[in-house]
Amino acid sequence: MRRPDLNILAQFVVVARHLNFRRAAKELAISPSTLSDRIRELEDQMGGRLFNRTTRSASLTDLGVTLLAQTADALAVLEDAANGIATGATQGQLVGKIRINGPRPALELCLMPLVVSFLAKNPGVRVEVVTQDELVDVVAGGFDAGVRYTEMLAQDMIAIGLGAEQRMVIAASPDYLKQNGTPRHPRDLLGHNCIGTVFATGNVLPWSLERQGEDVEFTPQSNLIVNSIENSLIGARASVGLVYTFEDYVVEDLATGRLVEVMPEWTPPFPGPSLYFSERRLMPPALRAFVDHVKEPTGLHTTKPKPSR
């Protein structure tokens, strides 16, 4: 079999990242038809389809996923080396690109402080952080790593904890509680306006409550359903209803009395999210440096996620 051209392999990685030939062609500054022909050439060399294609998008086949896992890291290392030479980087100056995805609260509250401090030390690295609440295959999506909570991780991933425990809270404005009463038990929520949070999939976030081994999952009922934390807080501050969110987002509101926490015994702390990535023989230097940086503040070690129950 003829050895695949490195340029075509690099173009394959770009298509795999976008899962769209037109967007990939735009990034590569070539025509979609030319890109399509080159991917077909690569498919002929590999002996099978790499993408399932439609008129609007593409998805990786099993062969495509395997090829991406085996080539993306090697190409990233080569690209980092070339970038270092092109920019005149001195020995020891790190260059490269890292792509990470995850749900917004985990990225904002846990990942971004680490990204900012990492970039302060390594200004030659470019970090792309993509908010994505739905679960995706980080390899198939062209990401170097992702951020997820442990129960959502596949067992073949390496995970590093990103920090301390987190906690959800239920809160409302003093005026709302004065007019509607203060709930003491999950059953009391049935009589309240509970601001809902909807995902891109259309699913509404359930309120997961726990006290001394008693678990309650409550589906909020409200005349306000939003898809952003800011909008849920705007509603709560305006006395529309109760909000269910991460404690870190309402620290100032609770401290000033603009919002009041209710039922705190039903929202115990839980383990924070983890940075995760596939086990690999060759890791791009920028990603390796970021992994080491993540481990520095806590002294945590890389671990295999436990099987979800």
Image (cartoon, rainbow, N blue to C red):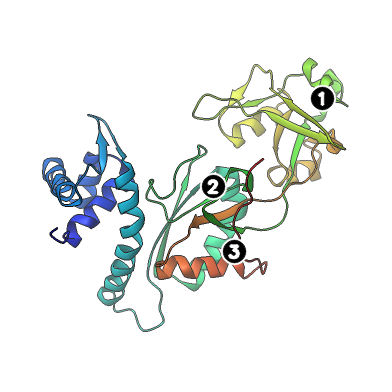
Q: Quadrant of residue 227?
A: top right
Q: Earlier in the sequence, mark 3 or mark 1?
A: 1
109 sits to left or right of 284: right
Type of the residue with mark 3: Thr
Q: Quadrant for residue 255, please give it.
A: top right
Residue 35 x/y as whole percent = 15, 46
Q: Position of residue 230 (x, y in %)?
A: 60, 36
Q: Secondary structure at mark 3?
A: loop
Circle 2 residues within 10 Å: few <14, some 14–19, many ≥20:
some
- Which mark is on residue 186? 1
The C terminus sits in image quarter: top right
Q: In this orientation, does residue 226 appear?
A: yes
The percent coordinates of residue 240 (x first, y second) are 70, 22
Residue 229 coordinates in the image, percent (x, y): 61, 36
Q: Are marks 3 and 2 in contact (CB under 8 Å)?
A: no
| 18 over 300 or under it: above or below | above
